[in-house]
Image (cartoon, rainbow, N blue to C red):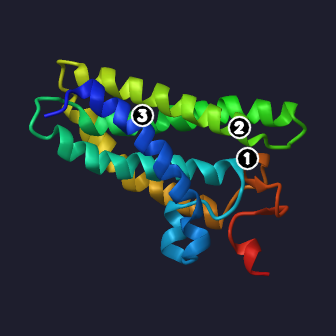
Amino acid sequence: MMNLKKIIIISIFSIFALSFLAHNIYEWFPNKFTSIFFPVNESIWEHQKMAFTSIMFFGIIEYFLLRKTKFNNFPLALVTSTLVTIILVISIFTPVYYLMDKKENLFLSLAIYLFAIIIGQIVSYFILKSKKNYKFINIISLISIPLIFTIFGLLTYYPPNNDLFYDNTEQKYGIYTYYE
Protein backbone atom coordinates (compact mmCIF):
# COMPACT_ATOMS: atom_id res chain seq x y z
CA MET A 1 0.00 0.00 0.00
CA MET A 2 1.32 3.44 -0.96
CA ASN A 3 1.51 6.26 1.51
CA LEU A 4 -0.20 9.59 0.93
CA LYS A 5 2.98 11.47 -0.03
CA LYS A 6 3.75 8.99 -2.82
CA ILE A 7 0.17 9.17 -4.09
CA ILE A 8 0.31 12.98 -4.15
CA ILE A 9 3.61 12.92 -6.08
CA ILE A 10 2.16 10.43 -8.55
CA SER A 11 -0.96 12.58 -8.86
CA ILE A 12 1.06 15.67 -9.81
CA PHE A 13 2.73 13.92 -12.75
CA SER A 14 -0.40 11.98 -13.71
CA ILE A 15 -2.59 15.09 -13.80
CA PHE A 16 0.04 16.91 -15.85
CA ALA A 17 0.23 13.98 -18.30
CA LEU A 18 -3.56 13.59 -18.47
CA SER A 19 -3.81 17.26 -19.34
CA PHE A 20 -1.94 16.71 -22.60
CA LEU A 21 -4.51 14.09 -23.54
CA ALA A 22 -7.43 16.24 -22.32
CA HIS A 23 -6.19 19.18 -24.38
CA ASN A 24 -6.91 17.28 -27.60
CA ILE A 25 -9.99 15.16 -26.83
CA TYR A 26 -12.50 17.65 -28.23
CA GLU A 27 -10.45 18.11 -31.40
CA TRP A 28 -10.37 14.32 -31.89
CA PHE A 29 -14.01 13.73 -30.90
CA PRO A 30 -15.94 16.96 -31.44
CA ASN A 31 -19.42 16.60 -29.94
CA LYS A 32 -21.61 18.09 -27.21
CA PHE A 33 -20.44 15.59 -24.59
CA THR A 34 -16.72 16.23 -25.07
CA SER A 35 -17.33 19.99 -25.33
CA ILE A 36 -18.44 20.04 -21.69
CA PHE A 37 -15.34 18.31 -20.33
CA PHE A 38 -12.54 19.37 -22.66
CA PRO A 39 -11.31 22.64 -24.19
CA VAL A 40 -13.02 23.58 -27.45
CA ASN A 41 -10.67 26.46 -28.19
CA GLU A 42 -7.43 28.07 -27.04
CA SER A 43 -8.94 30.58 -24.62
CA ILE A 44 -7.61 30.84 -21.09
CA TRP A 45 -11.01 29.81 -19.70
CA GLU A 46 -11.41 26.70 -21.85
CA HIS A 47 -8.03 25.43 -20.65
CA GLN A 48 -9.37 25.41 -17.11
CA LYS A 49 -11.69 22.57 -18.17
CA MET A 50 -8.56 20.63 -19.04
CA ALA A 51 -7.28 21.10 -15.48
CA PHE A 52 -10.61 20.35 -13.82
CA THR A 53 -11.32 17.23 -15.87
CA SER A 54 -7.77 15.87 -15.48
CA ILE A 55 -7.82 16.35 -11.72
CA MET A 56 -11.30 14.83 -11.45
CA PHE A 57 -10.29 11.83 -13.59
CA PHE A 58 -7.18 11.18 -11.53
CA GLY A 59 -9.33 11.71 -8.44
CA ILE A 60 -11.21 8.54 -9.34
CA ILE A 61 -7.93 6.63 -9.42
CA GLU A 62 -6.78 8.34 -6.24
CA TYR A 63 -10.01 7.37 -4.49
CA PHE A 64 -9.31 3.68 -5.12
CA LEU A 65 -5.71 4.09 -3.98
CA LEU A 66 -6.85 5.76 -0.75
CA ARG A 67 -10.07 3.91 0.04
CA LYS A 68 -8.49 1.43 2.45
CA THR A 69 -6.86 4.20 4.46
CA LYS A 70 -8.53 6.43 7.03
CA PHE A 71 -8.33 9.77 5.23
CA ASN A 72 -11.27 12.07 5.79
CA ASN A 73 -12.41 14.81 3.48
CA PHE A 74 -11.56 13.27 0.11
CA PRO A 75 -14.32 15.19 -1.77
CA LEU A 76 -13.23 18.45 -0.13
CA ALA A 77 -9.57 17.79 -0.97
CA LEU A 78 -10.43 16.96 -4.59
CA VAL A 79 -12.60 20.00 -5.25
CA THR A 80 -10.32 22.37 -3.34
CA SER A 81 -7.26 21.19 -5.27
CA THR A 82 -9.06 21.82 -8.58
CA LEU A 83 -10.17 25.29 -7.53
CA VAL A 84 -6.70 26.20 -6.23
CA THR A 85 -5.14 24.98 -9.48
CA ILE A 86 -7.60 26.92 -11.64
CA ILE A 87 -7.33 30.12 -9.58
CA LEU A 88 -3.52 29.96 -9.65
CA VAL A 89 -3.37 29.33 -13.39
CA ILE A 90 -5.71 32.23 -14.14
CA SER A 91 -4.13 34.62 -11.64
CA ILE A 92 -0.54 33.90 -12.73
CA PHE A 93 -0.95 33.14 -16.42
CA THR A 94 -3.26 36.04 -17.31
CA PRO A 95 -0.93 38.89 -16.25
CA VAL A 96 2.04 37.12 -17.84
CA TYR A 97 0.02 36.67 -21.04
CA TYR A 98 -0.72 40.40 -21.17
CA LEU A 99 2.89 41.30 -20.36
CA MET A 100 3.92 39.20 -23.34
CA ASP A 101 1.48 41.12 -25.59
CA LYS A 102 -0.96 38.18 -25.74
CA LYS A 103 1.62 35.85 -27.23
CA GLU A 104 1.90 32.51 -25.52
CA ASN A 105 5.24 31.03 -24.50
CA LEU A 106 4.66 27.28 -24.31
CA PHE A 107 7.45 26.58 -21.82
CA LEU A 108 6.29 29.35 -19.49
CA SER A 109 2.65 28.27 -19.82
CA LEU A 110 3.53 24.67 -18.93
CA ALA A 111 5.70 25.79 -16.00
CA ILE A 112 2.84 27.90 -14.60
CA TYR A 113 0.41 25.02 -15.09
CA LEU A 114 2.72 22.51 -13.39
CA PHE A 115 3.32 24.93 -10.52
CA ALA A 116 -0.45 25.34 -10.05
CA ILE A 117 -0.97 21.56 -10.06
CA ILE A 118 1.79 21.13 -7.46
CA ILE A 119 0.28 23.75 -5.15
CA GLY A 120 -3.21 22.30 -5.66
CA GLN A 121 -2.00 18.83 -4.74
CA ILE A 122 -0.12 20.12 -1.69
CA VAL A 123 -3.38 21.71 -0.51
CA SER A 124 -5.11 18.37 -1.14
CA TYR A 125 -2.44 16.61 0.93
CA PHE A 126 -3.01 18.85 3.94
CA ILE A 127 -6.79 18.51 3.72
CA LEU A 128 -6.48 14.73 3.56
CA LYS A 129 -4.09 14.70 6.52
CA SER A 130 -6.54 16.68 8.65
CA LYS A 131 -7.98 14.68 11.52
CA LYS A 132 -11.20 16.68 11.48
CA ASN A 133 -14.02 15.35 9.33
CA TYR A 134 -15.88 18.12 7.51
CA LYS A 135 -18.95 16.03 6.63
CA PHE A 136 -21.18 18.91 5.53
CA ILE A 137 -18.45 20.54 3.41
CA ASN A 138 -17.69 17.15 1.86
CA ILE A 139 -21.33 16.83 0.81
CA ILE A 140 -21.26 20.34 -0.66
CA SER A 141 -18.02 19.42 -2.45
CA LEU A 142 -19.62 16.33 -4.02
CA ILE A 143 -22.63 18.37 -5.14
CA SER A 144 -20.35 21.05 -6.59
CA ILE A 145 -18.61 18.68 -9.03
CA PRO A 146 -21.53 18.31 -11.47
CA LEU A 147 -22.39 21.96 -10.85
CA ILE A 148 -18.89 23.05 -11.92
CA PHE A 149 -19.06 20.88 -15.04
CA THR A 150 -22.45 22.46 -15.80
CA ILE A 151 -20.95 25.93 -15.46
CA PHE A 152 -18.09 24.95 -17.78
CA GLY A 153 -20.60 23.65 -20.31
CA LEU A 154 -22.77 26.75 -20.15
CA LEU A 155 -19.79 29.06 -20.51
CA THR A 156 -18.59 27.05 -23.50
CA TYR A 157 -21.89 27.60 -25.30
CA TYR A 158 -22.64 31.07 -23.88
CA PRO A 159 -19.29 32.74 -23.17
CA PRO A 160 -19.20 36.34 -22.05
CA ASN A 161 -17.37 38.76 -24.34
CA ASN A 162 -14.37 38.88 -22.06
CA ASP A 163 -10.67 38.34 -22.77
CA LEU A 164 -10.64 35.28 -20.51
CA PHE A 165 -13.03 33.55 -22.94
CA TYR A 166 -11.47 34.83 -26.16
CA ASP A 167 -9.52 32.45 -28.37
CA ASN A 168 -6.77 34.71 -29.69
CA THR A 169 -5.66 32.03 -32.16
CA GLU A 170 -9.00 31.75 -33.98
CA GLN A 171 -10.24 35.17 -32.85
CA LYS A 172 -13.55 33.76 -31.61
CA TYR A 173 -15.45 33.05 -28.40
CA GLY A 174 -16.90 29.75 -27.19
CA ILE A 175 -18.04 26.94 -29.42
CA TYR A 176 -20.92 28.19 -31.54
CA THR A 177 -18.72 30.63 -33.38
CA TYR A 178 -16.75 27.66 -34.69
CA TYR A 179 -19.71 26.42 -36.70
CA GLU A 180 -20.09 29.49 -38.91
Closer-to-camera residue (68/147): 68
The span from disc 2 to disc 3 (Cα, nearest Å) is 23 Å
Sequence-first disc among 3 and 1: 3
Q: Which residue is drawn at 25% across and 36% down?
A: 74
* Mark 1 or 2, nearer chain start: 2
Above or below residue 168? Residue 123 is above
- Say which residue label 1 marks: 164
The residue singled out by tag 3 in the image is 81
Q: How far apart are marks 3 and 1 (CA)?
A: 21 Å
Q: Which residue carries the number 2 mark? A: 107
Mark 2 vs mark 3, foreground winner is: 2
| Tag 3 near tag 1, CB within 8 Å | no
**Up/down of 117 relative to 123, above or below:** below
Q: Tag count in the figure? A: 3
Identify the element where label 1 is drawn.
helix
- Residue 28 x/y as whole percent: 57, 73
Above-or-below relation of 107 to 20: above
Residue at image coords 23%, 34%: 136
Q: In this view, does 68 lie to the left or right of 130?
A: left
Q: Quadrant of the N terminus?
A: top left
Q: Helix, strand or loop at disc 2?
A: helix
Crowding at label 2, few (<14), some or many (≥20) Cα neighbours within 10 Å?
few
On the image, which quarter does residue 100 sit in? top right
Q: Position of residue 21 (x, y in %)?
A: 51, 58
Q: Residue at x 63, y 32 (%)?
A: 111
Q: Distance from label 1 to label 2 (Cα)? A: 20 Å
Q: Are there few (<14), some (14-19), or many (20+) residues within 10 Å of tag 1?
A: some
Task: Look at discs 1 and 2 and give the one toward the viewer.
Answer: 2
* Tag 3: amino acid: Ser
